[in-house]
Amino acid sequence: MKNKLFIYILLFNFIALFGCNKFDELNSNPNATTDVNASMLATTVILKNLKFGGRDAMEYVSDNGVAKYVAYANQSIMSSQYAFLGPTTFDNMTILPNIDNMLKYSTGIPAENSYKGLAKFSRAFMFYQLSMKVGDIPYKQAGKGLSEGLTMVPYDAQEEVMKGVLSELKEAEEYFAKGITFAGDPTPYGGDPKKWRRAVNTFRLKVLLSLSKRDGNSSIPVKQEFSNIVQSGELLEESTGHLGLNYSAVNVHPLYSTNTLITSRVIMSSLLVNQLKSYNDRRLFYYGEPAASEISGGKLQNNFNAYVGAEVAENYDVNTAAYLQGKFSGINLRYQKLVTSDPRIIVSYAEQQLILAEARILGWISTGTAKEYYESGTKAALKNVMNTDQSYAHGMAINQAYIDGYFTGEALFKTDQSDQLKQIWIQKYFLNYMQDPTQSYYEYRRTGYPIFPISSSTSLNVNKKEAIPMRWLYPSSEITRNQSNLMEALNRQYGGNDEINQVMWLLK
């Protein structure tokens, strides 16, 4: 018996030693492990960029305060409401090692080109967002800490960053054009490279329009590149859907179940409310709640005049007292009560059409008319809201008949180009409410519209009491870890002064 056992052990060891390689070749999928890793990293990368990245519901509300969508009447002053912007963070640069590893694990698999496209888009998206906040940033040599031991990274001028961003977006579009469906995509696109390709091109248009002040005054051929993208025809269609994330039981809306903590005292701004009223826009009923005092005074919840916004530049104590007396409209209860609420929309057909409307007026493109783009963009935005829970629409649900009859009165496309631009810009403002509000702040910086309220008596903008800040400050961590490179960037841009009223390159 012992001899037989000994023989079996020898035979097993022989097979293990000499046969395992051949066995693995015959019985394993060479792509399985790397494909799973690439998929998992793709999910991580996409969520890092597209998911709301703030700490909590208060930060979500504060972002809406930056764009003057809301006021706050709970516990303490919301500084963003009163023209204060502090240090930002470069934490999103931690995405870079994950992008590199995603590329590593996707090498040689069928969906390699799609993952390359995702990598290029993800880098470009992240660097663009950071540069829009502060100006010059570490770009060309960022992310080389692990591979090259580079910890003190030089800053690149914003013009060079934007050139790089546009170049990477072009590469992303080209890779997606050659790609196949890839795994690990948590967006509604489900890894469809055709949809990603269109979304990338639309985002390219968005980046180029943000450079409108530098058209003809930089090394970037803004107008020509914009025109080339439009002529390609590879843009979002209404049926493509949005690039973003759908909220769910796993990824709940940031304001869900926060009534007693935060959202019970978030007030709609008079800027937003009054503009929606002037357009006879039913999004008002989806965005807010009627003021309690107006309801007790006899108005119905489906009456536009039952909705009253707060002047965001008014004294905090005055606004709080008025809200407690029921004089103002809070934000719609669906943000607190629904796990799903609105989807998070980052790139959409609605915004694309409004971008094209402005470009047509600027003479950047010759196809279509500004009116057609304006109307198709606005209709798409209204349809997005129509698809949300109508039980929270206070008896004023948006339907197709309302959308078809929307363009009357103030919404009717005007004849004067300056008025047309304001109509386009306000429609952009409407669609970013509780979505990506910093984009509305960026649009304000670029266009000056809508006019953000400011009061020297309440402003927290210490150095310029009657002005809206133009930028965030650099991260405090850069002062301790990368001071020499930071100071070089500050001297190049802002005379050595890291201050919120300094004007970055793309706004000059």
Image (cartoon, helix red, strand yellow):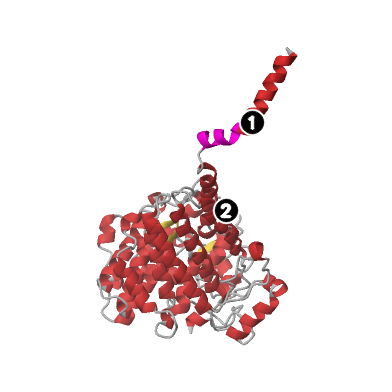
Question: For this view, does 165 lie left or right of residue 58?
Answer: left
**Residue 228 coordinates in the image, percent (x, y):** 33, 72
Give the numbered dot on residue 16.
1
Q: Which residue is mark 2?
A: 258
Closer to the camera in the image, 372 or 37: 37
Position above or below: 4 against 255: above
The image shows residue 20 at horizontal and vertical percentages of 60, 34
Whether residue 309 can be seen here: no
Residue 436 appears in the picture as rendered: yes
Residue 317 coordinates in the image, percent (x, y): 61, 70
Considering the image in quadrants, where does the N terminus appear? top right
The reply to whether the magenta stretch includes residue 315 is no
Amino acid at pointer 2: Thr
Location of residue 409 (image quadrant): bottom left
Q: Earlier in the sequence, mark 1 or mark 2?
A: 1
Q: Amino acid at mark 1?
A: Ala
Which element is circle 2 on? Answer: loop
- Magenta-highlighted residues: 19-28
